[in-house]
Amino acid sequence: MAIRKLLLPLTGTSAGEAALTTALMTARIWNAHVTALHVRVDSRDVAPLAGEGLSGAMIEEMMTATEKESSDRAHAVRAMFDRFVAAHNVELGEARRGATHATASFASITGREEDLVAQQARLADLTVVPHPEANEDVSSSDALHAVLFDSGRPVLIAPLATPATIGTRVCVACNGTAESASAVLGALPWMQGAQHVRVLASDEYHRRGPQAPDLVAYLSLHGISADIATFRAIDKEVGAGLLAAAREFGCDLLAMGAYSHSRLRQLILGGVTRHVLEKSRIPVMMNR
């Protein structure tokens, strides 16, 4: 299945431009449409959080401050988007069938970001999410986790620095789980157009399910030739070993399942998904 529509949630400008570039690069590969979506905070949501003991005037002041901050952020994000599309000669417009080039549009709505982004993502072929900042706890990335858990669609985590290419050398992390199978399905269009494909496997990473040779045989039915590379954990971090194997291959797109263990366990104890989210410097496509 070709990629025709991308959703790009933009909450700020710090990592937004790299995400915009990644989304545009992807859209140009597929002649797809990018919808940049900014969700403004509803100042009315502040009142229930204010708690008891605050006067009406104090709550009103908090709502006014929230509204101003939300408005300032929305204007900054829109200005960044406008500068970007002008600098890169991106055609503005709506998604249309049979497009021969990439297009983009901007939308701003008000509400709970995690709810609205997940809902919008259900009718997008791919959601591109800015990479978590170096000082940001990945557990606080509401938009990312909303798409992973509530959209049923793949999410592409953009790297902090703009990649030179996307999807020419594709790695698939194989651990036999349903999440891994979903990642394979989402990556099929990419692998069919890639120059090289590699399946990454490790005894320390594998769960119950199909093995790497089984996946290679399955991919061959789709006309995809892939080889297998095994990796080991580095300093007891399986995710570090996975990323090292991807770097060794020159990977410019890593496809993997997300949270084969529970999200809570990974947030508390760490895990492959969390390590990759925090440490990856290449585009990573995750499925849940």
Image: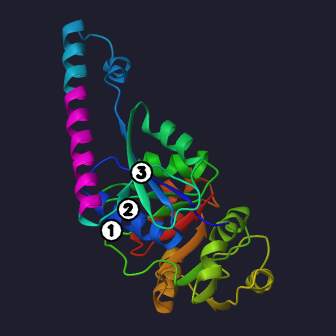
The mark found on residue 93 in the picture is 3
Do callouts 3 and 2 mark residues in contact (Cβ within 8 Å)?
no
Q: Residue at x 67, y 76 (%)?
A: 174
Pick the residue in front: 117 or 34: 34
Q: Name the residue type under label 2.
A: His
Q: Callout 1: helix, strand or loop?
A: loop
Q: Name the residue type under label 3.
A: Gly
Where residue 74 appears, as percent x and y from the top left, is: 27, 40
Q: How crowded is mark 2: few (under 14 residues within 10 Å), some or many (20 or more)?
A: many
Quarter of the picture holding the C terminus:
bottom right
Q: Residue furthest top?
A: 56
Q: Name the residue type under label 1.
A: Leu
Q: In this view, does 124 lie to the left or right of 44?
A: right
Magenta: predominant secondary structure element?
helix
* Residue with the mark numbered 2: 131
* Residue with the mark numbered 1: 160
Q: Which residue is drawn at 47% across and 89% down?
A: 250
Q: Is residue 276 left or right of residue 88?
A: right
Q: How far apart are marks 3 and 2 (CA)?
A: 26 Å
Pick the residue in front: 44 or 96: 96
N-term-proximal mark, 3 vs 2: 3
Q: Distance between the residues labelled 3 and 1?
A: 27 Å
Q: What stretch is highlighted in magenta?
A: 66-86
Say above or below: 132 vs 187. Answer: above
Quarter of the picture holding the N terminus:
bottom right
Q: Is residue 38 visible?
A: yes
Q: Callout 2: helix, strand or loop?
A: loop
Q: Is residue 33 left or right of residue 286?
A: left
Q: Which residue is drawn at 60% across and 59% down?
A: 259
- Is residue 275 on the magenta stretch? no
N-term-proximal mark, 3 vs 1: 3
